[in-house]
């Protein structure tokens, strides 16, 4: 069932793409970047998180535990403070995970089409 965006809140209807940078540096070339997580703020109290289930295949071993702990922490935080978590995810710029793109959509269909088909929702 499709849900309309909460148009009364300018923070809603936004999507951020969190990317893994091999080497974890700002100077890493784009070819070494892979989207790991997509966060969708649909309403003030509704944040959906989608992860690439194959992320362990392209993450350096030294970053696996950090990303596992982060992903485990995201689900409860998405329920308790969806806007705050989205704000944090949308401004990542240090370390191996960085926000590489932000988009705003008018309708949920366009958001759903932006999620790669192999990504899975974190619940």
Image (cartoon, rainbow, N blue to C red):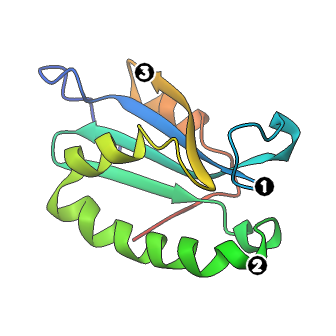
Sooner in the amino-acid sequence: mark 1 or mark 2: 1
Secondary structure under tag 2 reads: helix
Residue 50 appears anywhere in the view: yes
Closer to the observer: label 2 or label 3? 2
Q: Quadrant of residue 113?
A: top right
Crowding at dot 1, Cα within 10 Å, few <14 / some 14-19 / many 20+, comes out as many
Q: Nearer the viewer, residue 95 or 90?
A: 95
Task: Locate residue 95 relative to residue 6 in the image: left or right.
Answer: right
Structural distance between the alpha carbons of marks 2 and 3: 35 Å
Residue 2 shows up from this direction = no
Residue at label 2? 61
Q: Which mark is residue 105?
A: 3
Mark seen at residue 22: 1
Quarter of the figure that contains the C terminus: bottom left
| Horizontal side of residue 48 vs 94, given as left or right | left
Q: Position of residue 62 (x, y in %)?
A: 71, 77
Q: Residues within 10 Å of mark 2 (few under 14, many from 20)?
A: few
């Amino acid at each position: 069932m499709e849900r309309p965006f909460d148009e009364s809140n300018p923070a809603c209807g936004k999507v951020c793409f969190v990317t893994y940078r091999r080497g974890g540096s700002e100077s890493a070339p784009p070819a070494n970047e892979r989207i790991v997580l997509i966060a969708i703020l649909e309403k003030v109290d509704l944040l959906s998180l989608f992860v690439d289930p194959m992320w362990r295949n392209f993450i350096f071993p030294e970053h696996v535990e950090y990303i596992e702990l982060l992903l485990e922490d995201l689900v409860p935080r998405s329920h308790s403070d969806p806007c705050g978590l989205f704000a944090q995810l949308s401004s990542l710029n240090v370390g191996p995970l960085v926000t590489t793109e932000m988009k705003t959509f008018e309708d949920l269909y366009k958001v759903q089409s932006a999620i790669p088909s192999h990504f899975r929702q974190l619940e």
